[in-house]
């Protein structure tokens, strides 16, 4: 009876925790559950201007955007460095009919830089509608006019690459087609269903959780075995051993080094410094808040590199133990991931420090990083299990993995922006699970908002797919490990 | 009640002559269809059971499969066929000091090695002093293991391994470690454990020990059961074959 009562207590505790998490998550998610920011491609590199825009001239730029409403337009403008009295009108046409417009006086425009035209009221559109930007000047004349720029390439570090442009994308001035498109970017928002159905979803999951718990309780009472119960039993039974193994890994890592644990802080900081100097001077990059951007990438990748390499050796390196004492073999890779997580948590301290120094606002949403960390750990564990099993049978695995890690280092946006990846490779590029996790970290920490619901789903998939593959491989081979090590 | 039940257990090894540990080699052999293994049956159709509190001796020549059998019962090796059921916790004393870390102190290693042997945290905390006292290490317990002599290391390992009173103890040769004094002490400890209601499986080549300690004996030759039964009878038969 007492057993049953503790079971009921646990059940209620889990449900209460779930409820709290669901509510907290809703408030952390905020607007991002209802709308997603959308924008057209990055602005092309300004190469030439369209000359002074006089009364009567008309510049047309066709575009379309995957969004449900448009909130603003950014243009690359120039006032020729003088004080004009004229103004510039930006309107959006649908089927030749103007549907929205903003007018700004010359004084509000930038000289050889980007100017933002925010719509007074967001324009509701249907995603993918063929639209046109129409730029006119009500009162421009010779010597008292402004201009906008166009181009046909995208800047990449110091150079640029040509943008693939089709004929009906090109801009035109008074009906004459230019050999490029305007330097423009339209920003908008996309409606998301997730926010509206959030409470239904949360309730459904809660009910499913409660039913599952009841089933478990029933099974426990009647002594029926189930994977979940076995999992909790194993945790209870081997917790102390895992604690001891993590303790050993951590203590021996920095033993006999003068700075000891300080290296956990220093290592990511120094790596960031080196790469920061290299990529901000040798290869110009125009990523905003580059130090934090870079450090997030480095911290994530360091953990990935360290934990997978430690897992790789976890079975073959513990041969002495495995052939002498029976312990479930997954304990070894799991403890390796756990001990590298301590390092990951420690390296978040220098990250926070750099965020404070660079005055990156730290918002409450930063706590969502826990989800990212969890996904990263699960991802590393999955890959680690696979590597550990392979390593027992083929010692080549360690060398192959060394090469693969280097490839992944370049295939993940750590020190470069993801926008430099050509459109035709983007699908392949996004197959990299690390990409999704790093992106999640950046949105949470750099933008200070919750990512769109899709990003959570992608992060989970990126973590769970390797985990399932890893578990299956490990399970299939584990009985033969002892014969080969 | 049978605490250990071994039912038609067989264990096959693929011999190391053909063990492949590089992917290139594996692929080449796979393609040329030379992926053949030389098989060795280390255990063939072994069946027996041990009652709670009894001492079973396992005898046989070197390479007969005695250690393999102990490893199969400990769960380290999974048998190719057959089943094993074991009720209760096993402490395998196959090799002392498995998992010692040379950079950690003796005290830290007591907890690490104890955890590997399956002891609980509370148990180790209460028995820590007893282990230190038994090992006679004194001040050295706070030193990293790399500063230990091999005798000190074995004394510590023995003290950790024998501090519990497990339900099943698996012993590969009675472990007498350290100097003469400690050897006597450790032997006394082993005998105390064996006499204390623990079920024991022991491998030994010392017939006098087997006769003295064991209730029953299992005799294995070339992986097959040669005999199973009364200790004195089988020891006589085994001794007869040797001479």
Image (spheres, rainbow, N blue to C red):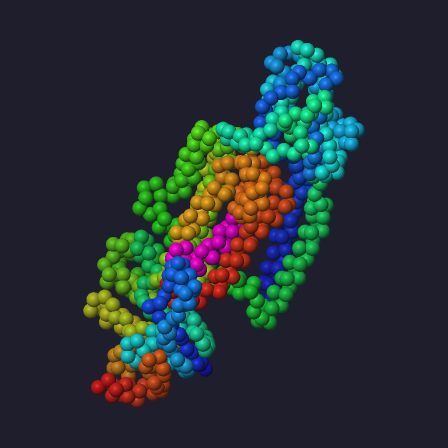
For this rendering, which residue is in front, A54 or B107? A54
Near-viewer residue (A138 or A464): A138
Q: Left or right of B108: which side holds A346?
A: right
Dividing the picture into quadrants, the one containing residue A333 is bottom left
Q: Quadrant of the C terminus of chain A?
A: bottom left
Q: Residue at x 33, y 80 (%)?
A: B222
| Residue at the image position 37 percent from the left and 77 percent from the top | B41
> Residue B232 at x, y = what percent?
29, 87
Q: Residue furthest top?
A: A143
In percent of width and height, residue A277 lies at 43, 31
Q: Relative to residue B23, is residue A172 depicted above or below? A: above
Whether residue B11 is visible to the viewer of this picture, yes or no, is yes
* Residue range of the region highlighted in magenta in the rendering: A370-397
Does A57 sit left or right of B38 as displayed? Answer: right
Question: Where does the N terminus of chain A fall, quadrant-wise?
Answer: bottom right
Q: Residue A368 in the image: x percent, y percent?
A: 57, 44
Confirm whether the magenta stretch covers residue A376: yes
Residue pushed farthest left? Answer: B180
Tell me residue A141's x, y (percent).
Answer: 70, 12
Give the number of marks: 0
Q: Is residue A296 magenta?
A: no
Residue A168: quadrant of the picture: top right
Q: Nearer the viewer, residue A363 or A386?
A: A386
- Residue A132, compared with residue A85, is above or below; it is below
Residue sitting farthest toward the right: A97
Which residue is pictured at 58% across the width and 30% down the height? A153
Can you tell which quarter of the image residue B201 is in? Answer: bottom left
Q: Main secondary structure of the magenta part?
A: helix
Query: At 27% across and 54% down in the image, what residue appears?
Result: B146
Tell me, yes or no, if residue B212 can be seen here: no
């Amino acid at each position: 009876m007492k057993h049953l009562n503790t079971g009921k207590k646990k059940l209620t505790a889990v449900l209460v925790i779930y409820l709290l998490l669901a509510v907290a998550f809703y408030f952390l998610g905020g607007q991002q559950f209802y709308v997603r920011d959308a924008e057209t491609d990055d602005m092309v590199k300004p190469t030439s201007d369209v000359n002074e825009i006089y009364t009567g001239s008309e510049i047309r730029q066709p575009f379309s955007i995957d969004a449900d409403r448009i909130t603003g337009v950014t243009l690359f403008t120039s006032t020729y460095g003088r004080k004009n009295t004229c103004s510039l009108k930006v309107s959006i046409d649908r089927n030749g009919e103007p549907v929205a417009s903003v007018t700004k006086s010359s004084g509000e425009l930038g000289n050889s830089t980007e100017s933002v035209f925010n719509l007074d009221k967001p324009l509701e559109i249907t995603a993918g509608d063929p639209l046109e930007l129409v730029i006119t000047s009500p009162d421009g004349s010779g010597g008292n006019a402004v201009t906008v720029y166009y181009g046909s390439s995208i800047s990449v570090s110091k150079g640029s690459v040509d943008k693939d442009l089709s004929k009906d994308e090109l801009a035109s001035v008074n009906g004459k087609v230019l050999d490029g498109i305007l330097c423009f970017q339209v920003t908008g928002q996309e409606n998301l269903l997730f926010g509206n159905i959030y409470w239904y979803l949360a309730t459904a999951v809660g009910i499913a959780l409660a039913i599952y718990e009841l089933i478990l309780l029933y099974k426990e009472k009647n002594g029926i075995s189930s994977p979940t119960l076995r999992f909790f039993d194993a945790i209870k039974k081997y917790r102390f051993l895992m604690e001891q193994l993590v303790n050993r890994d951590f203590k021996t890592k920095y033993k006999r080094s003068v700075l000891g644990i300080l290296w956990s802080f220093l290592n990511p900081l120094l790596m960031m410094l080196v790469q920061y100097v290299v990529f901000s001077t040798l290869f110009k990059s125009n990523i905003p808040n580059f130090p934090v951007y870079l450090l997030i990438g480095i911290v994530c990748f360091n953990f990935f590199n360290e934990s997978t390499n430690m897992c790789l050796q976890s079975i073959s390196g513990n041969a002495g133990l495995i052939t002498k004492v029976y312990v479930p073999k997954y304990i070894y890779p799991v403890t390796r991931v756990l001990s590298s997580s301590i390092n990951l948590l420690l390296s978040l301290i220098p990250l926070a420090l750099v965020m404070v120094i660079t005055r990156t606002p730290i918002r409450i949403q930063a706590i969502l990083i826990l989800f990212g960390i969890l996904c990263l750990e699960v991802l590393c564990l999955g890959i680690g299990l696979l590597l550990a099993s392979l390593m027992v049978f083929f010692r080549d695995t360690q060398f192959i993995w060394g090469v693969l890690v280097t490839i992944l280092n370049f295939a993940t946006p750590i020190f470069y922006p993801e926008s430099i990846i050509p459109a035709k490779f983007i699908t392949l590029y996004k197959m990299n699970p690390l990409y999704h996790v790093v992106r999640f970290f950046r949105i949470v920490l750099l933008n200070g908002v919750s990512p769109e619901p899709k990003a959570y789903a992608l992060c989970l998939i990126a973590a769970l797919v390797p985990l399932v593959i890893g578990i299956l491989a490990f399970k299939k081979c584990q009985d033969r490990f002892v014969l080969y090590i | 009640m049978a605490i250990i039940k071994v039912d038609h257990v067989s264990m096959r090894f693929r011999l190391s002559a053909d063990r492949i540990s590089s992917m290139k080699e594996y692929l080449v052999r796979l393609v040329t269809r030379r992926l053949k293994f030389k098989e060795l049956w280390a255990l063939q159709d072994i069946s027996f059971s041990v009652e709670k509190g009894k001492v079973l001796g396992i005898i046989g020549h070197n390479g007969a499969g005695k250690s393999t059998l102990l490893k199969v019962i400990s769960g380290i090796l999974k048998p190719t066929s057959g089943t094993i059921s074991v009720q209760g916790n096993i402490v395998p004393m196959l090799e002392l000091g498995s998992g010692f870390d040379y950079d950690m102190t003796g005290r830290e290693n007591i907890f690490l090695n104890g955890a590997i042997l399956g002891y609980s945290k509370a148990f180790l905390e209460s028995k820590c002093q007893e282990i230190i006292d038994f090992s006679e290490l004194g001040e050295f317990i706070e030193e990293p293991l790399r500063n230990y002599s091999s005798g000190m290391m074995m004394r510590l390992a023995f003290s950790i391994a024998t501090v519990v009173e497990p339900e099943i103890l698996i012993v590969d040769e009675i472990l007498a470690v350290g100097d003469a004094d400690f050897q006597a002490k450790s032997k006394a400890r082993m005998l105390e454990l064996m006499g204390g209601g623990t079920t024991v499986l022991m491998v030994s080549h010392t017939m006098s020990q087997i006769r003295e300690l064991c209730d029953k004996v299992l005799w294995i030759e070339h992986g097959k059961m040669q005999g199973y039964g009364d200790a004195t009878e089988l020891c006589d038969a085994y001794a007869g074959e040797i001479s």
